[in-house]
Image (cartoon, helix red, strand yellow):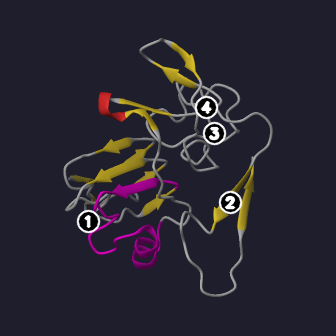
Amino acid sequence: WTAHPDIDCRNCTFYQNGTTIRMYNEPNSQGPSVFKNNIVYADGAGRSCLYSRPDVSDYNNLFASGGAVIHPWARDLAGWRSVTGRGAHSTTADPLFADHANGDFHLKSEHGRWDPAQTDWVVDGQTSPCIDRGDPTELPDAEPTPNGNRRNQGVYGGTAQASKSASGRSLYLVSPNWGEVWQSIQQIQWSAL
């Protein structure tokens, strides 16, 4: 639980943090609370990814499994978006950590992932959906190439240990997003990287 005049939480990874993440601004805060480019993984009944609703919350991966929910009064991502009006570009998918049981939260990648145990780059058999999913207005900074010219989500996004992207251009479906069901005609959005 945090109460602070200026909360800016970007590129963090939260895994099995008890019950939830709560962010509140003090009444006389100088700016909005910001929650972007994060990975939140909640597992087990009675747990949730978020409790509060930050002023700005987008481009996060909120993954709830084993009976956990996205928010206590909005069980899934679509419900949370509907209630809060936030998270239009957020996703909900297994982030595919390298070895979360042993504290390795690097994202798996078929194109290269830093392995701290081997102190070298390794190649995985699958690629995390959190690679190249950060806010497109934020540069990848120190991410090694190829980096899709877009920041990864999570703690290693924007760093030299960020998992690598596919070479060349990629086309990503932005909307509909991870399991949404639309009942009428809607506009599909794509992002080319």
User: Mark on residue 27?
Assistant: 1
List x then y, in percent, for residue 30.
Answer: 36, 57
List x then y, in percent, for residue 114.
Answer: 52, 22
The Cα–Cα distance between marks 1 and 2, rounded to whole angstroms, is 38 Å
Q: Earlier in the sequence, mark 1 or mark 2?
A: 1
Q: Earlier in the sequence, mark 3 or mark 1?
A: 1
Residue that label 2 marks = 173
Dot 1, crowdedness within 10 Å: few (<14), some or many (≥20)? Answer: few
Q: Is residue 138 left or right of residue 65?
A: right
The Cα–Cα distance between marks 3 and 1, rounded to whole angstroms, is 32 Å
Residue span colored magenta: 59-86
**In the image shown, does 122 or 186 lie closer to the viewer?**
122
Q: Earlier in the sequence, mark 4 or mark 1?
A: 1
Q: Is residue 24 magenta?
A: no
Compared to residue 186, the image places residue 7 above or below, namely above
Dot 3, crowdedness within 10 Å: few (<14), some or many (≥20)? Answer: some
